[in-house]
Amino acid sequence: MASKTGSVFLKHFTQLNASVHVYKPLSSLLNASDSNSTDYSVPASTAPDIILLLSWAGANIRHVAKFVPGYLELYPTAQIVLVTSSFTDFIYGSRPGQKNQLKPVIEAIRSDAEPVVLVHLFSNGGAHMLWRLAKLYKDHTGQLLPMNLLVLDSAPGWTTFKRVANAISYELPEAWYLRLPSMLLVYFMLSLFCLVLATTGQVNIVDRVWKELNWPQLISVKAFRCYIYSRTDKLVWWKDIEGHVDEAEAKGYKVRTETFEGTEHIAHMRSDATRYWKIVEGAWEQRQQQRD
């Protein structure tokens, strides 16, 4: 689709706090897209009003922004809210300061009386962010988070010691003399965390998110779902995702699944952008058909 990288468009986003960046449609931004790209074939009346991009944990915003051009081509009239997350959000996400970070997202959604919302999350970090946002929205309004389509890229998965360590390792320095002590610290902290969970009987937050994203009292069954994943993903096991799909369908959620061959974690769009965006566009059209 678009030939320009996402970083070209970041200057058109307004940073509201450390985690939230917002884009509101501007003619100057639309003119910046490639003139030879796909036609804007989706009328504003059938396009989403708001697109929430919920990043994987520890993601560089420039990496998440690579998904922006695709959405600008599909739905140029939509407002885009980009939310980044960190590994500390898993630990301190329930604290007041962390809750305040998501208030601009709630305000953006509530600025429209009946918003049409597309949520696109990445990995367990994005799944955790949706879980936090849905709980906070319900606490503030007494209602479920408005959501017409939920796209889940490489998520959700159960947690294991090895997978969590591998996920964190992606953000560590490449130089061995920095990476080695960093990994030792990661293993120590994870071991301590597992010990606390074992002695207190608490369920770790990743597994809790896996379960509660299939709770109709938290996530509306009216939201159509599209799971995008790979069987070669080393960070989130494909069986965890398919287990989530089975449970979602059993609880009344309408679901579409798309499997990529040989792709790594969150690398499906990079592998085949044309197919990836056709899947998103098709899922958006399919949710309309399901509603009708």
Image (cartoon, helix red, strand yellow):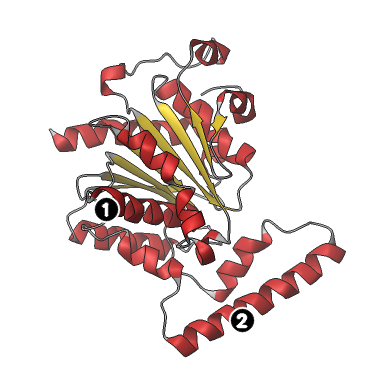
Q: Residue at x 48, y 60 (%)?
A: 93
Q: Which mark is residue 191?
A: 2
Of pointers 1 and 2, the one earlier in the residue sequence = 2
| Three-letter residue code for mark 1 | Ile
Mark count: 2
User: Quadrant location of residue 116?
Assistant: top left
Residue neighbourhood size for the residue with mark 2, other residues' Cα within 10 Å, grouped as few (<14), some (14–19), many (≥20): few
- Residue 62 pos. (x, y %): 63, 37
From the top left corner, tell me how far across and down residue 154 is, in percent: 46, 53
Q: Is residue 179 above or below residue 45?
A: below
Q: Kindly identify which residue carries mark 1.
A: 219
Q: Position of residue 201 (x, y in %)?
A: 41, 85
State the residue in front, 104 or 28.
104
Image quadrant containing the C terminus: top left
The extreme bottom residue here reads: 199
Q: Secondary structure at mark 2?
A: helix
What amino acid type should be assigned to the residue bearing mark 2?
A: Ser
Quarter where residue 206 is shown:
bottom left
Question: Quick check: marks 1 and 2 in contact, CB under 8 Å?
Answer: no
Residue at horizontal 26 percent and vertical 23 percent from the top: 46
Query: Can residue 36 be seen at all in this image of the molecule?
Result: yes
Q: Quadrant of residue 165?
A: bottom right
* Left or right: 181 as drawn, with respect to 271: right
In the rendered image, is residue 279 in sight? no
